[in-house]
Image (cartoon, grey):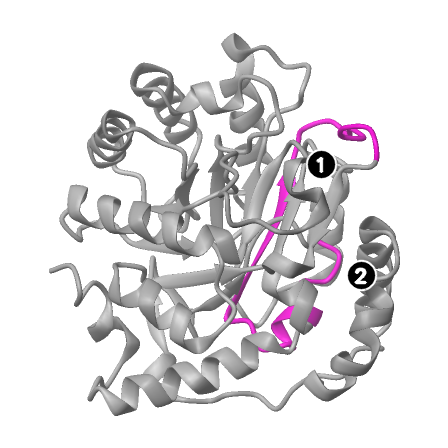
Amino acid sequence: MSVLYNLIGPLLRRIDPETAHGLAISALKRGLVARPAPVDDARLKQTLWGLDFTNPIGLAAGFDKDAEVTDAMAGQGFGFVEVGSVTPRPQPGNPRPRLFRLPADGAVINRLGFNSAGHAQALENLLKAGPCNVPVGVNLGKNKDTSAEDAAGDYVDGVRAFQSVADYLVLNVSSPNTPGLRALQGREALRELLLAVQGVLEGPSRPALLLKVAPDLTGKDKEDIAAVALEIGIDGLIISNTTIARPEVLKSPHRKETGGLSGRPLFEPSTRVLEDFYRLTEGGLPLIGVGGVSSGAEAYVKIRTGASLVQLYTAMIYRGPGIAAKINRDLSALLQRDGFANVADAVGVDVR
């Protein structure tokens, strides 16, 4: 698959990014994308939240917004797949152009603005697909025209809609492209939101509840989020979303576009935030590390810094969907080299 993508990748990257994304989804739906050889290694397997993960490398939210290709992405070697962000009502998102490649930087800037077909469509797609052979998470957002005061209602609606079909649910309060959204990370607003959502999670088989946070947080922000997460008893944190920062090292012509920056420049800052949260939660809360991962070595750094699981998306744009299988092979070799019988044994070893 990587050889094929090396041939067609440059052609895809000459096409408008959103058009290329649509073509990729269409090809995956039709089974036109070759599947890499599966990586079956006991070192990579673990159980979290009662869910069995065959490997720790997951697809981050943003690629499969409307839950159209969960099975296809599992077939690309991902150990779990996160769909969304999904909003209660359909919305088009921000005006185009709103997605920009930064190839010289291995990065992307997006200001999509939660473009979504809505809860009903994503739910229909998940039900039609049936059970997936890897855990599937649903990333929940709020509609742009929902006020901050009413935001909790959008997330409550999302939990009600998807708790019977999702293995885990994510409250996305950290996208930089929906006005006022990041304010929900404040201590009191976050506490109210988590209590409201916890109140509608039902039954012993309820999905795990996670919170996705921004990398652009002050020390006090991080302390407050960690304290509220532990107090309310959510199941984990995803660290982190895209950044509004613009490192001076960026070279690509689109580097000054507004929106969230993802990819290689996000690796170091997001990993520092990951370490901060691992310390603040004293390793007592499972963390998913996201941001700039494109190799087994980088996934390994995230794990050693405190991530039980790792996600990626931007690297796939430049290296193709088969990247997950290669990362897993390389990660397995690193675990073996360092004498770890299981990936869970390596979580946080550089921070403890």
Q: Which residue shows up at 31% across the image and 15% down it?
A: 188
Amino acid residing under circle 1: Leu
In what element is the residue under mark 2? helix
Amino acid residing under circle 2: Ile
Q: In this view, does 226 lie to the left or right of 183?
A: left
In what element is the residue under mark 1? loop
Q: Quadrant of the N terminus?
A: bottom right
| Nearer to the camera, 55 or 9 | 9
Distance from label 2 to label 1 (Cα)?
17 Å
Q: Earlier in the sequence, mark 2 or mark 1?
A: 2
- Residue span colored magenta: 67-96
Mark toward the viewer: 2 or 1: 1
Residue 87 is covered by the magenta coloring: yes
**Residue tagged 1:** 112
Percent position of residue 230, x then y: 21, 36
**Residue tagged 2:** 25
